[in-house]
Image (cartoon, rainbow, N blue to C red):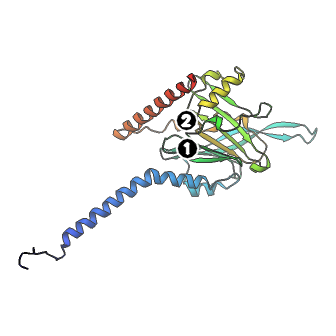
């Protein structure tokens, strides 16, 4: 048996130590990448599904941390004049808070004086953040992907129908859906915020509903535009059209003030956004020609 090679079975301590260190380093890099991308997305989605109208602000802060923005906002609600018994509108002040969920989305809450969440919403701004959100008892939408036409058209005789606004720099579209007792007397406002992504401008609908009431144009826009924002409202007497359509997403004038990123990463992200926006416009133009 002299022809058999000699095998050294001694443990090389330095080689083993180097392999362990390299493995730990690779694990930490992979874990950090996961937590900052797809893993963080899963955490945001799970925490968002734990929210509900009338929860405490401290509960929301325990899930998402401190908000980046906090300010007061006046909206209206329905009240009864006890002297004459007539219904009227009264001003109500609420605290609005907004969280930037990484580079993926914005979370917004509207709280009462007792810091009770009266309504909350989420707006996606990334192609990798497309959570599934239940709308009422029988419908679901995927933010950034589902079109407005995937939901029933708003009733023309309802108090809140489709609302939109197109200005020189800003635009937004919203429509409300209410399902009564099966939906827990909640209202779901879905729409397109110019802060979110993708965001199709309702140019053909003109500046506001008073200037365009053509059902064909509204239906054409609903068939093309993708939902990027959802606002969930608890059962109450809020007059939502006092904050809509822009209230479906975060306030543009505040979130736009975040210092933009620099360097290669920022350039790659900007290129990716341009590619997605161009692809979306091409696809929408094809659907329009059909």
| Residue 110 visible here | no
Q: How many marks?
A: 2
- Residue at the right extreme, as displayed: 84
Q: Earlier in the sequence, mark 1 or mark 2?
A: 1
Q: Quadrant location of the C terminus?
A: top right
Instruction: Give the residue at x 40% y 34%.
Output: 271
Residue 214 location in percent, x, y? 71, 21
Residue 218 location in percent, x, y? 67, 26
As drawn, the label of residue 53 is none
Q: Where is residue 201, by image quadrant? A: top right
Q: Nearer the viewer, residue 207 or 111?
A: 207
Q: Is residue 42 left or right of residue 159?
A: left
Structural distance between the alpha carbons of marks 1 and 2: 9 Å
- Dot 1 and dot 2 residues touching (CB under 8 Å): yes
Q: Where is residue 31, by image quadrant? A: bottom left
As drawn, the label of residue 195 is 2
Secondary structure beneath label 1: strand
As drawn, the label of residue 106 is 1
Residue 24 location in percent, x, y? 32, 63
Q: Nearer the viewer, residue 27 or 140?
A: 140
Secondary structure beneath label 2: loop
**24 in relation to 42, above or below:** below
| Residue 230 visible here | yes
């Amino acid at each position: 048996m002299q022809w058999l090679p000699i095998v050294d079975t001694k443990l090389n301590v330095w080689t083993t130590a180097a392999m362990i260190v390299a493995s730990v380093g690779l694990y930490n890099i992979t874990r950090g990448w996961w937590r900052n991308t797809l893993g963080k997305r899963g955490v945001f989605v799970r925490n968002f599904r734990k929210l509900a109208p009338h929860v405490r602000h401290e509960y929301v802060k325990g899930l998402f941390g401190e908000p980046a923005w906090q300010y007061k906002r006046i909206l209206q609600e329905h009240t009864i004049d006890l002297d004459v018994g007539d219904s009227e509108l009264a001003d109500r002040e609420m605290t609005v808070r907004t969280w930037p969920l990484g580079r993926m989305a914005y979370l917004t809450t509207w709280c009462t004086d007792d810091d009770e969440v009266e309504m909350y919403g989420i707006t996606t701004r990334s192609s990798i953040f497309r959570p599934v959100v239940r709308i009422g008892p029988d419908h679901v939408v995927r933010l950034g992907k589902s079109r407005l036409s995937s939901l029933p058209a708003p009733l023309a005789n309802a108090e809140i129908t489709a609302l939109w606004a197109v200005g020189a720099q800003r635009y937004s579209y919203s429509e409300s859906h209410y399902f009564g007792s099966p939906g827990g007397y909640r209202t779901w406002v879905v729409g397109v915020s110019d802060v979110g992504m993708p965001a199709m401008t309702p140019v053909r609908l003109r500046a506001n509903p008073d200037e365009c009431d053509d059902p064909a144009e509204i239906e054409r826009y609903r068939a093309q535009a993708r939902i990027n924002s959802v606002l969930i409202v608890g059962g109450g007497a809020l007059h939502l059209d006092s904050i809509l359509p822009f209230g479906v997403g975060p306030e543009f004038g505040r979130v736009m003030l975040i210092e933009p990123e620099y360097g290669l990463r920022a350039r790659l992200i900007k290129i990716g956004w341009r590619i997605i926006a161009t692809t979306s416009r091409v696809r929408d133009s094809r659907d329009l020609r059909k």
